[in-house]
Amino acid sequence: MTPKVYINGKLYDKPDAKISVYDHGLLYGDGVFEGIRVYEGKVFRLKEHIDRLYDSARSIYLEIPVGREQMTEAVLDTVRANDKRNGYIRLVVTRGAGYLGLDPRKTTDPQVIIIVDDISMYPPEMYDAGMEIVTAATIRNHPNAVNPRVKSLNYLNNIMAKVEGVRAGAMEALMLNHKGEVAECTGDNIFIVRQGRVLTPPIDAGILEGVTRDSVIGLARAIHQGGHEGMLVPLRPTKQRVSVAPIEDASLMSRWRGFQPRSCTFRMACAANFGVAAVKRVSAPIPEVR
Ligand SMILES: Cc1ncc(COP(=O)(O)O)c(C=O)c1O
């Protein structure tokens, strides 16, 4: 079945889903987006993603032309139109088409785009055997420049670090902030388990406030009375290859399963050389049932 793409209230077959080459989303990465999972026909934490989209838009002075409720319905309608029980939603709002200058006031008609498609995961064996990541020399954007909390269409910072990882033979790269502290990976938040406690860098480290991150902290707090945020400092210099040890916290999973029969599995990248082990296959309930 050809994917159906939503653009400004209408569904188009994928080959016909087009926007202007003058759109500032294309010309400058001027816009915001969300990446959302669908598990067994249910959209995971849709409200949190919609809220973050509007927060991101507000911080770049982009007015989204539809309200949150209408946006929520548009996402759900597009999932239904694509009959996608398990997959990925890419929700994008661009600044819109304008002149070939930076000034956003010269743009008109922000484009609201919703793509529902399959998700490409890491190779399955990595979920059991772990994966290697490298610490990138490219640092995460300074929060006073392009704040990592804003999920903007401008992902070049992450892409440069990703390229470093790929060139070093790794599928993910760990990014430090301007102070040399651990921030996050190129497309994932990072967790470590140290002495039975789940730790993750705080938002102040200059990271995206991940929806998955929030779920994991909630789970850790519920089950382990843990789930601490703490600044992590690498013990070794950057460009160090680290291996990710898979840990499957069986007690966490099985005890959780005891509470919640339906769960989903997160994809996570984690590092090992900070006395760190990977949190992998963390199971969580699907809170947003629509
Ligand atoms: C830089 C970055 N950090 C973290 C995440 C994880 O965020 P979430 O759990 O909200 O999908 C993403 C996801 O796109 C990301 O791009």
Image: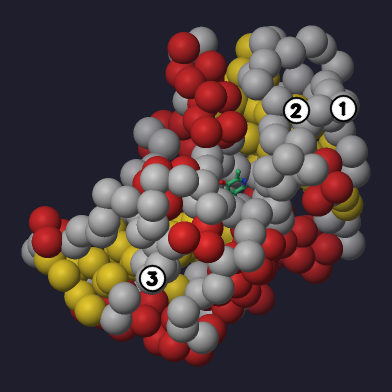
Foreground of the two, 282 or 139: 139
Residue that mark 2 sits on:
176
Cβ atoms under marks 3 and 1 closer than 8 Å: no
Circle 3 residues within 10 Å: few <14, some 14–19, many ≥20: some
- The colour scheme used to paint the residues is secondary structure
Locate residue 137 relative to residue 236 in the image: left or right: left
Q: CA distance from mark 3 to mark 1?
A: 39 Å
- Label 2 beta carbon less than 8 Å to ligand 1: no
Question: Which quadrant would residue 218 be assigned to in this image?
Answer: bottom right
Residue that mark 1 sits on:
179
Q: Residue at the spot x=88%, y=52% of the render?
A: 228
The amino acid marked with disc number 2 is: Leu
Q: Residue at the spot x=80%, y=68% of the render?
A: 222
Foreground of the two, 107 or 173: 107
Locate residue 90 relative to residue 21 in the image: left or right: right
Q: Is residue 178 above or below residue 15?
A: above
The amino acid marked with disc number 3 is: Asp
Q: CA distance from mark 2 to mark 1?
A: 8 Å
Question: Which quadrant would residue 224 be assigned to in this image?
Answer: bottom right
Image quarter in which the C terminus is found: bottom left
Classify mark 2: helix, strand or loop.
strand
Foreground of the two, 214 or 108: 108
**Circle number at residue 109:** 3
Q: CA distance from mark 2 to mark 3?
A: 37 Å
Answer with mark 3 or mark 1, whichever residue precedes in sequence.
Answer: 3
Cβ atoms under marks 2 and 1 closer than 8 Å: yes
Classify mark 3: helix, strand or loop.
loop
Locate residue 193 relative to residue 211 in the image: left or right: right
Classify mark 1: helix, strand or loop.
loop
The amino acid marked with disc number 1 is: Lys
Circle 1 residues within 10 Å: few <14, some 14–19, many ≥20: few
